[in-house]
Image (spheres, helix red, strand yellow):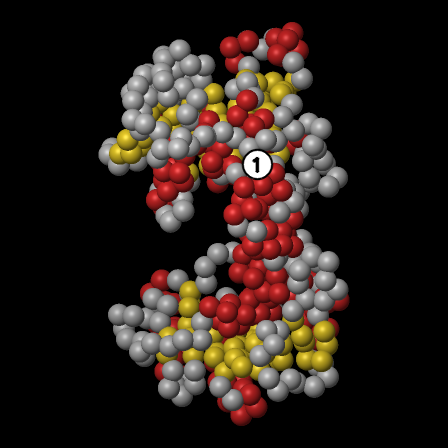
Amino acid sequence: MAKILKPQQGPQEIFLSTPADIAIYGGAAGGGKTYALLLESLRHIKNPGFGAVIFRRQSIQITQEGGLWDSSFEAYGSIRGAVPKTSPRRHWRFRSGARVSFAHIDGDKDLGKWQGSQIAMIGYDELTHFTKRQFFYMLSRNRSGCGVKPYIRATCNPDADSWVAEFINWWIDPETGYPLRERSGKIRYMARLNEDIVWADTKQELVLNGVNEVDIKSVTFIASTIEDNKILLENDPSYLANLKALPLVEREQLLKGNWKIKPAAGLLFKRTKVNLLEILPTDVILWARGWDLAATSEDEDGEPAYTAGVLIGKRKNGRYIVADVINRRCDSAEVRELIKMTCMADRAKYGRVITRLPQDPGQAGKAQAESFLKFLAGFTVKILPESGDKVTRAEPFSAQWLGLEGMDKGNVDVLAAPWNEMYFNQMESFPQSKFKDMVDASSSAFNEIENGGTYSAPPSESSLGKNSYWRK
């Protein structure tokens, strides 16, 4: 039985039918963006001189399980005469000789590899991962000698801080950040003059303002969300639930396509979303205390910097309890004693507690980690380098703190204690607040509970700094 390749009705169909020179599609997760790019690349496969290149930011995003290369087999695997090849780069060659290739641009250093290229169709899977310079450099490679008018197709998810957000600003509601449905698919015209982009509603308007017609490009943005992908919702209905369970900022971006929202005070942690408990629950199955150590002995005002330790427990019912928070200004010697005394107090009061410390990068960080492990001998200690920025590390805990959309409360309880106001003030003001130590410590404890809790051999000189675990 022949397999029919065609777009779904709605935004995907509009994306594949637009005549715009540059079309950007998506603005939310699950809208069928990658598949649309692959379908678009089939348009000219009977043209022996046609060549398309679809870019990802990193090569692993092409080859990873379920990535671009795997997806291409679903789109191209049933086409008679289509042959997948892996050299010189992964690509498909069709019966006519037309080609669709997959490549990455991992930085500006990669741009020189494309000097002299002629690419009839350039595709970007997740355009916000590429810089403005990379996009406009490759636009100069978007040319053709095969009779196909050169064009660019791109997909993306929202990123308020990316250059793409400014580029498609006309299609986005400035108040809500959501795409303006009545403008989705509308074509506008732009020219880039001295690195400034000039826009107009018609090509003639730009020409009348002195722009050379050959410098004018037509542009459109087509908005879509998971609701437009009926096939995905039918095949994997749980994916919608996964999006609804994301932290607020990511949920707004990936589920609703919000281009204006970004982490701000009060968005990631709200005190009204937690339950205050007067008595410590007795059903905690795993404890972890995360620490954020002062990077320097003084802050920029010459005052001692803060060191924070946050104790979080996971309960049998799946909820989390913030049971204790320490936030003190200490010098380096006092920090070590504070952590050791806290380890002793935690063990006496709560039993087995995993103490998680951050490891600084480089050899100095390894030496500090080894020193801490020896100093804290007898306690369950884990030392790991931090990855990602502070907001990224905080998002998993934020998702539990805020709970699902529409819920009055989240999935986090806080033990009533004198430190509550200090803690809530910093959590609610994150990430704009000057100090973020208690947030970092909370993220560390939560991420240890969810991703850790296992152990391997004690660290040796060769294994320190490689995500090793250690216990008595």
Q: Amino acid at mark 1?
A: Gly
Q: Quadrant of residue 185?
A: top right
Comparing 257 with 354, the one in front is 257
| Residue lying furthest bottom | 348
Residue 432 makes an appearance in the image: no
Q: Is residue 14 above or below residue 31?
A: above
Residue bearing the label numbered 1? 26
Percent x, y for residue 307? 56, 73
Q: Is residue 245 above or below residue 231?
A: below
Q: Quadrant of residue 211?
A: top right
Percent x, y for residue 343? 50, 85
Comparing 437 with 20, the one in front is 20
Mark 1 Cα shell of 10 Å, populated few (<14), some (14-19), many (≥20): many
Rendered-image quadrant of the C terminus = bottom left
Q: What is the count of numbered marks?
A: 1
Q: Quadrant of residue 169?
A: top right
Percent x, y for residue 242? 57, 55
Q: Who's the residue at 65% across and 71% down the image?
A: 412
Comparing 225 with 205, the one in front is 225
Residue 428 makes an appearance in the image: yes
Q: Is residue 277 left or right of residue 449?
A: right
Q: Who's the residue at 52% across and 47% down the image?
A: 235
Q: Who's the residue at 36% across and 13% down the image?
A: 146
Q: Is residue 318 left or right of residue 358?
A: right
Q: Secondary structure at mark 1?
A: strand
Rendered-image quadrant of the N terminus = top left
| Residue lying furthest front | 1
Q: Who's the residue at 53% across and 77% down the image?
A: 289
Q: Is residue 249 above or below residue 356?
A: above
Percent x, y for residue 263? 63, 52
Q: Is residue 209 above or below residue 251?
A: above
